Amino acid sequence: MRILINKLLLPILILVLAPAFTCQAAPESMTLDDFVAIAMGNNPRIEIARQQYMGDEGLLTQARSLYLPRLSGGVSYGRQYIDTELPVTEDNVGTGLLRASQLIFDFGKTTGLIDTQSFGLSASAENLAQVYHDIVFQVKSSFYSVLEAKRLIGVAEQAVSNYEQQLYRAEKFYEAGVRTRIDVTNAKVNLSNQRLNLLRANSNYKTSRVALEKVIGTIPNNGDYEPVSSEPALEELAAEKPAMPGPLDNLLLTAEENRPGIKQFQFLIQAAESSVTQAKGDYWPTIDAVGDYNKFETDLASLSDQWQLSARLNWEFFSGFETEGKVAEASAQLREVKAGLRDFELEVTQDVTDSYLRADENREGVDIADQTVELAEENLRLAEGRYKAGIGDLLEFNDAQLLYTENQSNLVITYYNYLTALARIDRAVGVTPELAEYDLTEIKQSAE
């Protein structure tokens, strides 16, 4: 009977426990490249820039259409009376009109408009490229914040473990009559405080993940993921940290050649110059050709089918100074864009220089923090040994442990500040490794 019950219960237990084992599957490991790829397809700012590019492409199509023939037609039906026509003076009249027109020359108005929209489209492409650089930097910065928070959890966990061991020693010494009750109480207080720090570290990690998810525009794998990196252990961070990208002078030259914002301003200047040409075109005539064909459906003899082909010249000699105003407006916009380029070039120089100096500062800071961690670790070992030997007090150990934890945290924070500063240099000079395969042609295709 017992065997029969076991046989019946075994399948039930398997069905009950199977979901539990399934839920314990390891989260999906995701690298920086994975997050960048997700952001490229989901960040709303990229979609906004793409649609702006598509809109400017439509404006260019509209401008080019002015040089193409225009074909239109229409029909009408009504009753018409002619008092000089006999014997029929009145009849229902159906009319069909087919018209073709072609712009021949307008002294730069249409050409200027086409050039304006063409350069504007190129500027829009550079704006889209800049958005890509900005988003990759934001992904990197958020990703490094997640890794930093994750490392700080490890630092807090190690501190909790050390305080737990110290509490154990204090209790044993108290039981042996070597130490007083205050050592045990003090150790418990320190352990509680460090557990609170661990709780905060875990909360900061969750918050940093939310910030990363906002940048990439989605929550990967329904939140069941783990950001991973091939970075070395804490004690190897200083020795294996990435190198600086190069001299500052070279970075400034690279930014001048590659920063999308500078290229965008250069195209905007060309667009503004074309707008001046377009505005000045109103001083001159417009020449076009028009062909009409009229089809009449009626019994009135005087209304027979007609066609007409003509060339027209339209010249507005005086427009109430409207043309002067348009030229003045376009010229002012040109000067404004040129001044904007000079201001932006100064901003780029500041951005590259500041990013470089911050990166160099944090590079040296990593080395200093690493040396300090080693000294703090040695100090902690000495304090722990003195306490065990009975020649040191708990206060000395607590100070040493606090100093060690603080310096570990400083090393982690400085290291990821260094990585973020390197990513900021990439953005400042306009050379982001993750976008090495992108060019304006690919950007255009992705927008379409």
Image (spheres, rainbow, N blue to C red):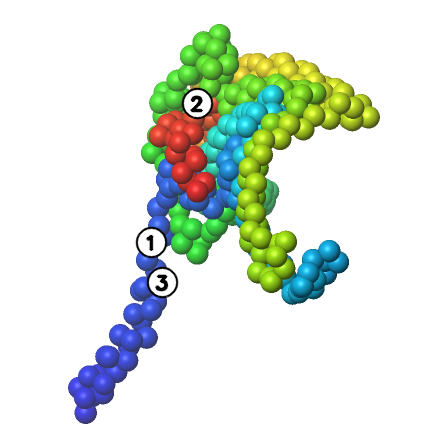
Gap in angstroms between the C-alphas marked 1 and 3: 9 Å
Gap in angstroms between the C-alphas marked 2 and 3: 42 Å
Provide residue 58's location: percent of width, then percent of height: 53, 39
| Residue 172 in view, yes or no | no
- Image quadrant occupied by the C terminus: top left
- Which residue is more in the foreground, 85 or 240? 85
In terms of secondary structure, where does tag 2 sit? loop
- Chain-order first, disc 1 or disc 2: 1
Gap in angstroms between the C-alphas marked 1 and 2: 36 Å
Which residue is most to the right?
Answer: 320
- Residue located at (58% from left, 56% from top): 296
- Residue located at (31% from left, 64% from top): 21
* Tag of residue 431: 2
- Which residue is more in the foreground, 379 or 75? 75
Relative to 335, say whether 149 is above or below: below
Count of numbered labels shown in the rendering: 3
Of tags 2 and 3, which is closer to the observer?
2
- Which residue is more in the foreground, 305 or 414? 305
Relative to 344, say whether 132 is above or below: below
Q: Residues within 10 Å of mark 1 (few under 14, many from 20)?
A: few
Q: Amino acid at mark 2?
A: Val
Q: Residues within 10 Å of mark 3 (few under 14, many from 20)?
A: few
* Tag of residue 26: 1
